[in-house]
Amino acid sequence: MSLPYAILTALLEKPSSGLELTRRFDRSIGYFWSATHQQIYRELGKLEQAGQIRVLPSKQPARGQKKEYEVLPAGREALSAWVARSEDPKQIRDPLLLRMRAAAVVGAPGLNAELLRHLGLHRRQLAEYREIEQRDFPPERNSEEDRLRHLVLRGGIDLENFWIGWLTRALAENETEAEKPSSPGC
């Protein structure tokens, strides 16, 4: 499971509370590795118990004050070992692809509407990624960290372009097939 490593990465970028982490996941890491608030808090507990993170000492003791976490050397070592590890690509598991396969068997009423909806979603996501790219990666930001972060974003941009192209082709093929006259005797 990669969630602990996503959390360690986020905490190494900036020590944060659980709430801040969930917000950061919603705004950045969550674009490519999503997690619920409950999963994040549960994982924080496991990482703390494993000695990979700790709660930062509070400036002033207060009841109910949010805990801020930082990564300990053991957490950095675990993250470094994970980064260096070899891992095969994961298979695509997209319900839309499975529904299309099922539609080949049971028919496809409404399939084009769903393809159009997905096309719109991917176009919006691409526009959001491009805004992030414009805002966060001007040419003068060329440190190693920025370059790697920008590559991750470019991966997202490329995936959205893939889905937009594929959905556009799928819609065109479905429309062409629907326009063909049905064969006599069918």
Image: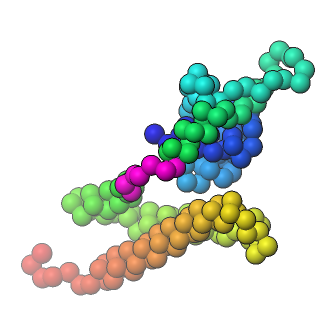
Q: Residue at x 54, y 38 (%)?
A: 78
Q: Please identify the quadrant where the C terminus is shown.
A: bottom left
Image coords of residue 47 (percent x, y): 58, 29
- Drawn side of residue 11 relative to residue 64, left or right: left
Whether the magenta-drawn stretch holds residue 86 is answered as yes
Q: Nearer the viewer, residue 138 or 178?
A: 138
Q: Where is 112 relative to 79, above or below?
A: below
Q: Which residues are magenta?
A: 83-89
Give the quarter of the image for residue 96.
Answer: bottom left
Q: Nearer the viewer, residue 74 or 138?
A: 74
Number of callouts in the render?
0
Whether the magenta-drawn stretch holds residue 99 is answered as no
Q: Residue at x 60, y 35 (%)?
A: 75
Label the magenta part by its dominant secondary structure.
loop
- Drawn side of residue 62 relative to residue 16, left or right: right
Image coords of residue 77 (percent x, y): 57, 39
Give the quarter of the image for residue 4.
Answer: top right
Q: Residue furthest right?
A: 60
Image coords of residue 166 (percent x, y): 42, 73
Q: Where is 101 relative to 54, above or below?
A: below
- Quick check: can you spot residue 42? no
